[in-house]
């Protein structure tokens, strides 16, 4: 089943290298101004303004700067980058070159997740083609002194490497353990130099903005969330696939697009996202409402939400890097808690303790993985009260003692 | 700051080039991936040699290998089958596919067949949820798996 590739931004018509040509004519500062004025925010889910990030790196006096494209999508239910990597490789690579030009980088990395190793051929071929076309290498498109090339680096099956500082650690040849932030990569990135790290989708959007302008981009989406978002829709629906939707589209509309019936809940943002119950299906995909990296998983009435929560926590238990205590020790306790909930053995008192632990994890974990690991658990407790029954008996109650 | 490589080194084993190391510590992961691809695992002797050529302690190399789930310190099967176990795949019946593989290969998940041909593993999301249930055979992604398809995949190994 092939879903039509159509949408207002990413899947709209574009001429190859037109964005880069415009960028070179505009000059470094104006490129950054255009990106800033477009209100483009990071498409990985965190939503940091791209123009601002580029400016941080550009104004730094450091002698070397780097551009990194994060193609390590590992969030359960995310596969939108797979489509961009295999079907539109020129689009985001051009965005990387534009980024490199505007911040003054000479080298870029494409960090590709290990699971996508089979795409290496397509990407290497595209890079080679771009070198031949003169858009990678020295004096790009005749612009004296602008040299840039991209190297592909493979991940090796670690979800946490999608976190930008962990990704940089991994490129440097270390364990992919997240660093403390601040300093952010824009200040201290690859080998200590200022580094722009952006999602594949962000770079793809940049290319379109440079061709069609900031005003055009702002006319799509909502006031606070300009443009569109790629969603990876999977689960209980007839038409799973990658969809491009303008920001501000409600869950109800998306479900209709994917032809989903009898829907009980939707998981927006993957394992680290939130679970939305049917009564809230009027909520919208936008940074100011539901922010997502692109994962959209549909559950129908026959599904047990507690099982889904358990699956996510098992995933986090497997993928936690184990560096900081709240995440490493908290996840197994929550997982056990979910199992107790399912068996009807969890008491009100213990549930309170689990929620307090969840809060600690959100506050005290070092990176996004630990901070968002309890999200699903909290969602279930808050929104799906019918799914579990609490025990009144105290005999199985446990304290946090390891 | 990146440390320059101690000595330029090309390691040849049994007449084949195993890895070349000529740069900085940042080459560690690509070098490890090369060795993993060629041998299927990274032995203690390899770790020692890689560490020497990069001018770092072998324990550092070991710590990096063990962090990444696609790098192994022990020999696994010639082929690795990874069944995606994220929620979309579970809902589409990935556990059934896993059971079918277990039955056809006569091993449990996490084990390797006696003839060292195939290792069966669970994977986190492999980015194929729209074509669930999906599996990864070595580097290849295969979507829309049906239990009947299991035998074909195994037969192709022989």
Image (cartoon, rainbow, N blue to C red):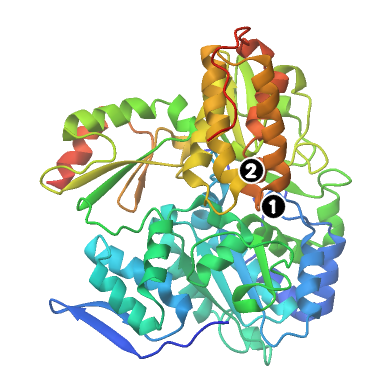
Pinpoint residue B53: horizontal percent, then vertical percent. Answer: 35, 84
Pinpoint residue A385: horizontal percent, then vertical percent. Answer: 68, 14
Decide if residue A72 is in sight here. Answer: no
Under circle 2, the secondary element is loop
Where residue A328 sits, quadrant-wise, is top right
- Return the chain for callout 2: A
Pinpoint residue A302: horizontal percent, then vertical percent. Answer: 53, 13
Where residue A388 sits, quadrant-wise, is top right
- Which residue, given by chain and number where applicable, does mark 1 sit on? A43
- Which residue, given by chain and number where applicable, does mark 2 sit on? A294
- Return the chain for callout 1: A
Q: For the point 74% across and 46% down, which residue is it?
A: A228
Where residue A257 sits, quadrant-wise, is top right
Nearer to us in this view, A227 or B113: B113
The number of numbered badges drawn on the structure is 2
Label 1 CA crowd tier, 10 Å (few <14, some 14–19, many 20+): many
Do the residues under discs 2 and 1 have CB atoms within 8 angstroms? yes
Q: For the point 66% across and 84% down, which residue is it?
A: A64
């Amino acid at each position: 089943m092939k879903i039509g590739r159509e949408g207002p931004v990413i899947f709209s018509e574009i001429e190859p290298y037109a964005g880069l040509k415009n960028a070179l004519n505009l000059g470094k500062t104006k490129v950054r101004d255009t990106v800033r004025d477009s209100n483009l925010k990071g498409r990985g889910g965190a939503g940091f303004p791209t123009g601002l990030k580029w400016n941080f790196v550009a104004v730094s006096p450091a002698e070397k700067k780097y551009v990194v494209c994060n193609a390590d999508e590992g969030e359960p239910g995310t596969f939108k980058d797979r489509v961009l990597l295999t079907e539109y490789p020129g689009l985001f690579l051009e965005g990387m070159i534009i980024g490199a030009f505007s911040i003054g980088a000479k080298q870029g990395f494409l960090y590709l997740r290990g699971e996508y190793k089979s795409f290496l051929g397509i990407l290497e071929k595209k890079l080679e083609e771009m070198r031949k076309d003169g858009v990678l290498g020295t004096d790009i498109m005749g612009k004296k002194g602008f040299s840039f090339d991209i190297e592909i680096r493979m991940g090796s099956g670690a979800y946490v490497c999608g976190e930008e500082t962990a990704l940089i650690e991994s490129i440097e040849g270390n364990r992919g353990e997240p660093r403390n932030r601040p300093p952010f990569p824009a200040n201290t990135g690859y080998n200590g130099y200022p580094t722009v790290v952006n999602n594949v989708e962000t770079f793809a959007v940049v290319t379109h903005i440079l061709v069609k302008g900031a005003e055009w981009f702002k006319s799509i989406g909502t006031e606070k969330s300009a443009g569109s978002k790629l969603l990876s829709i999977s689960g209980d629906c007839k038409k799973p696939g990658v969809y491009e939707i303008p920001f501000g589209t409600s869950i109800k509309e998306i479900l209709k697009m994917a032809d989903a019936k009898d829907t009980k809940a939707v998981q927006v943002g993957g394992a680290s996202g939130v679970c939305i119950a049917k009564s809230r299906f009027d909520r919208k995909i936008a940074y100011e409402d539901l922010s997502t990296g692109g994962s959209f998983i549909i559950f129908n009435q026959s599904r047990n939400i507690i099982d889904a929560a358990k699956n996510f926590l098992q995933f986090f238990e497997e993928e936690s890097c184990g560096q900081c205590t709240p995440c490493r020790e908290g996840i197994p306790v929550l997982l056990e808690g979910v199992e107790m909930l399912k068996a009807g053995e969890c008491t009100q008192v213990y549930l309170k303790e689990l929620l307090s632990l969840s809060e600690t994890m959100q506050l005290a974990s070092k990176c996004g993985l630990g901070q968002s690991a309890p999200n699903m658990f909290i969602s279930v407790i808050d929104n799906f009260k019918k799914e579990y029954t609490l025990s009144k008996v105290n005999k199985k109650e446990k304290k946090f003692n390891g | 700051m990146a440390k320059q490589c101690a000595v330029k080194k090309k390691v040849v084993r049994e007449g084949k080039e195993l890895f070349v190391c000529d740069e900085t510590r940042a080459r560690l992961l690509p070098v490890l991936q090369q060795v993993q691809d060629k041998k299927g695992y990274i032995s203690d002797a390899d770790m020692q040699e890689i560490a020497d050529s990069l001018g770092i302690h072998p324990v550092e190399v070991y710590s990096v290998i063990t962090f990444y789930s696609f790098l192994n310190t022990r020999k696994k099967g010639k082929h690795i089958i990874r069944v995606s176990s994220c929620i979309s795949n579970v809902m589409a019946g990935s556990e059934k596919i896993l059971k079918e593989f277990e039955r056809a290969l006569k091993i449990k998940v996490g084990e390797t067949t006696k003839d060292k041909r195939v290792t069966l593993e669970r994977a986190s999301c492999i980015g194929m949820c729209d074509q669930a249930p999906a599996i990864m055979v070595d580097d290849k992604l295969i979507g829309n798996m049906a239990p009947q398809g299991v035998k074909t995949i195994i037969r192709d190994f022989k």
